[in-house]
Amino acid sequence: MMIRRTALCLALMVAGGLAVPAHAAATVGQPAPNFRATDTNGRTHQLSDFRGKYLVLEWTNPGCPFVRKHYDSRNMQALQKEFTAKNVVWLAVNSTETAASDYLPPAKLAAWMTGQGTVPTATLMDVEGTMGRAFGARTTPHMYIVDPQGRLVYAGGIDSIASSRMDDIKTATNHVRRSLSEALAGKPVSMATTPPYGCSIKYKS
């Protein structure tokens, strides 16, 4: 089953070929789309809450082998810990529709995140796909960085090797770490857009 699931996700992997959601993607260098979404604990979050801080948005779905690659290896958790310790806000976002076979309701998603030892600031539920479509999120994972003024400064993949193999993490360039490190040092982000890769987001039709 996992082999078939991985093959399916590989077929849907985005490196520029998968159709984007109905709305145009957010534009790097422009204000990030406003959003209002509820987390797995029922608390509401919106973009303006994080004014003055760097914000990472991580689209996720525990049923995706590409997400599992970065969580089972503890790569995603390491990034979360490294940058939340530097006062960066980190929001995981699940835009999987409720009818999808791998949809997890809030309590189960929260339990999975806790079991993985994750430390995002919050995990948002976007079952209507409003937030995902506003950003143009296409894959899990799909990563975005918003600066303290609310501008989008990075959009794309977590790293440079578009595979579901954990062994590739150690030789890949981690785009999120590089971009955040540059931004926090007051430097321009040297590669502000990269191709996202992973499983296609199962948006509500």
Image (cartoon, helix red, strand yellow):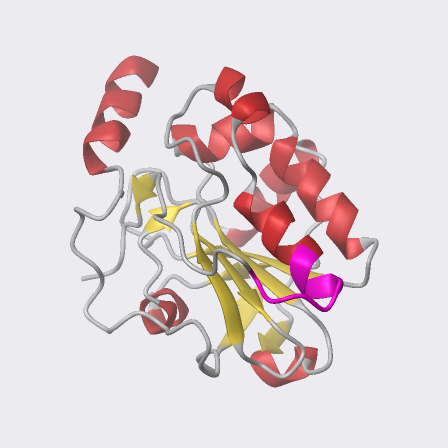
Q: Which residues are magenta?
A: 182-189
Q: Residue 129 occupies which quadrant of the picture? A: bottom left
Residue at figure coordinates x 60%, y 67% from the top left: 188
Residue at figure coordinates x 22%, y 48% from the top left: 16
- The image shows residue 192 at horizontal and vertical percentages of 47, 61
Q: Nearer the viewer, residue 35 or 195?
A: 195
Q: Is residue 100 left or right of residue 140?
A: left
Which secondary structure class fits the magenta region best? loop
Residue at figure coordinates x 77%, y 46% from the top left: 82
- The image shows residue 94 at horizontal and vertical percentages of 45, 54
- The image shows residue 79 at horizontal and vertical percentages of 68, 43
Q: Residue 163 occupies which quadrant of the picture? A: top left
- The image shows residue 147 at horizontal and vertical percentages of 62, 73
Q: Is residue 187 magenta?
A: yes
Q: Is residue 122 visible?
A: no
Q: Is residue 183 magenta?
A: yes
Up-down relation of residue 17 to residue 70 (above or below): below
Q: Is residue 163 left or right of residue 56?
A: left
Q: Is residue 149 visible?
A: yes
